[in-house]
Image (cartoon, rainbow, N blue to C red):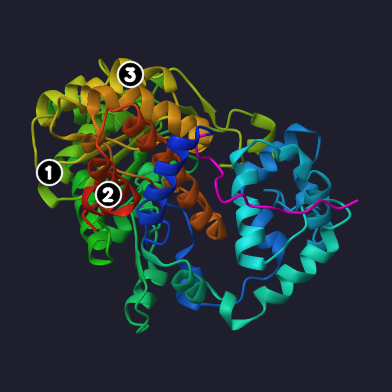
Amino acid sequence: MSQPLVLHPDRLFPADAATRAVARQLYALVERLPIVSPHGHTDPRWFAENEAFPDPATLLVKPDHYIFRMLYSQGVKLEELGLTRRDRGPVETDPRKIWRRFAEHYHLFAGTPTRLWLDHVFATLFNIDQRLSASTADRAYDVIAEKLASPEFRPRALFERFNIDVIATTESPLDALASHAALRTSGWKGRIVTTYRPDPVVDPDFAGFADNLRQFGELTGCDTGTYAGYLEAHRIRRAFFRAHGATATDHGHPTALTADLAGREASALYDRVKHGQASAADAELFRAQMLTEMAAMSLADGMVMQIHSGAMRNHNPLIYNTFGRDMGADMPTRTDYVHALKPLLDRFGNEASLTIILFTLDETVYARELAPLAGHYPALRLGPPWWFHDSVEGMTRFRQQAIETAGFANTVGFNDDTRAYLSIPARHDVARRVDCATLAQMVTTHRMEEDEAARLVVALAGSMAKAAYRL
């Protein structure tokens, strides 16, 4: 028997009546504000080509690691979900069968942020009023497929319907940015900017690193055989990205280690790296050196720097070898910031014109390390919880542990960090509701006045991110 799909108007608000009333008042101020999405992974080709999305499974299931990692943990093979194998081996190609398999397991997402996001999408975007299950799978598929075929559900139309102010995508330094170039000459008013993600030419452990360095030199006309030429290649590509709207860089390193090597030592390290002679310690030291080099470049060109640390990437070798990178097997690790960032901060931490946004998967460092660092160094800001912790509880824990030392002013609002385009409004709605609940509790416990809460909730909903990312 099917169950109704209900979005309660007070979801995520406090149970206490007085506090809930304040949360409602605050939410009324931000519910319909434009969305600022300063860090994400939507495909710019969607907006450049503006073609209809192919089917519900391809849009909602296959690109979302939150979905397929849960299903895989419960014994569903990724081949059954249509994910492409590296060896081009057989996988399910019927989108309706993939959707049915997802719907049969929808109950697994009870209590997760994924469930909040998806129910929001189903109810508000597709007007589905029955909870997804095996019995409702086909009906939901048909409703979604029919709507996706209509002009109102093309990528640009959805961008406008979602009331998105700006989206930043994330591209490799080897990307030609053809879709961004096409958007700039399309006449469409939607704002899509790129972000410089240099990992493929910074991380010696990145697959194809040697070939990436060769391409990097060819793209820029620089001699990447030398350290000086390699750094110049970064400057040239950063300028190219800025010409296509980029205001930020992003660095997905396994740790937050930084280094500040002398020129000769850095050149010798690069020689070992480029020739494939780097040890594990060399690789880590090179990544550390490059974070400091990227900070120097950001100080010079004004790009905001984001550091995503604390993930052991591709933890499951079977999945990595079969399907490749970014398949839901990145795991949180203990992360040091106080000692690891010191070489970088010794050089640049006191630069008020530089913005470095720190993210983490290690919640244990919120109060002990991140908040005190951001609460002192002018160059540092705290990014919101991400991936495993961009949830109701994760956001609440972040606010409880970080704000007392760093204040709201040293954070940057919210970013959705998603490839799942349709979930963007849902994720921002969750973040806004959590902030309303947090601020309402501060008001009713007399730690903040209502006018301060009203000002802050609006800033957290968008203007703070827009300012921090210089958008």
Q: Position of residue 66 (x, y in %)?
A: 62, 42
- Name the disc covering residue 459, or none: 2
- Name the disc covering residue 299, or none: 1
Dominant SS of magenta comes to loop
Q: Position of residue 450 (x, y in %)?
A: 27, 41
- Label 2 element class: helix
Q: For marks 1 and 2, give the one nearer the viewer.
A: 2
For marks 1 and 2, give the CA distance.
25 Å
- Label 1 element class: helix
- Left or right: 315 as drawn, with respect to 415: right
N-terminal-most mark, 1 or 3: 1
Q: Where 359 falls versus 427 (above or below)? A: above
Q: Is 319 colored magenta in this rendering?
A: no
Q: For marks 2 and 3, give the one nearer the viewer.
A: 2
N-terminal-most mark, 2 or 3: 3
For marks 1 and 3, give the CA distance.
27 Å
Give the image quarter of residue 326: top right
The disc labelled 1 sits on which kind of residue? Leu
Q: Are the residues flagged by discs 2 and 3 in contact, CB closer than 8 Å?
A: no
Part of the protein shown in magenta: 1-14
Q: Position of residue 254 (x, y in %)?
A: 42, 28
Q: Position of residue 209 (x, y in %)?
A: 43, 41
Mark 2, other Cα within 10 Å: few <14 / some 14–19 / many ≥20:
some
The residue at which mark 3 appears reads as: 367
Mark 3, other Cα within 10 Å: few <14 / some 14–19 / many ≥20:
some
The disc labelled 3 sits on which kind of residue? Ala
Q: Residue at x 48, y 31 (%)?
A: 394
Q: Where 141 falls versus 394 (above or below)? A: below
- Label 3 element class: helix
